[in-house]
Amino acid sequence: MGVYAELRGFVLTHRECGVLRGASKPIDRGFRLAVICPCGARFLRSVYAEDPEAERLREALAAFQE
């Protein structure tokens, strides 16, 4: 399962908890992805530039940062 599918599963599982918040932090070859749920659950992954889902994940993360 790819990171995007994992993120989608996390969002679907926690959508009833409230507003999810997201952030990213640059790392050597990509970025660190974090999505935090009001219930305390966290989705933390490293995403590397060569990952075919990297751009899709950046776009998805933008929805949590608005």
Image (cartoon, rainbow, N blue to C red):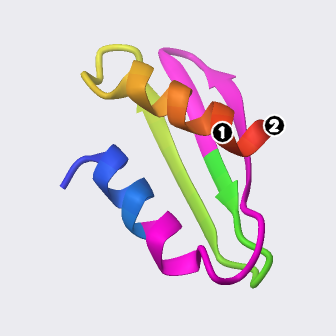
Is 34 left or right of 54, judged from the image as shown? right
> Where's the N terminus, which quadrant?
bottom left
**Secondary element type, mark 2:** loop
Is 55 left or right of 38, judged from the image as shown? left
> According to the image, label 2 marks what residue?
66
What's the magenta region?
Answer: 10-33
Give the percent coordinates (x, y) of residue 56: 40, 27
Residue 26 lies in the magenta stretch: yes
> Where's the C terminus, which quadrant?
top right
Q: Residue at x 77, y 65 (%)?
A: 19
Q: Is residue 8 above or below residue 17?
A: above
What crowding class fits label 2: few (fewer than 14 Cα within 10 Å), some (14-19), or many (20 or more)? few
Is 52 left or right of 15, judged from the image as shown? left
Give the percent coordinates (x, y) of residue 20: 72, 61
> According to the image, label 1 marks what residue?
63
Q: Are marks 2 and 1 in contact (CB under 8 Å)?
A: yes
Q: Is residue 6 above or below residue 17?
A: above
Q: Residue at x 34, y 47 (%)?
A: 3
Say which amino acid is labelled 1. Ala
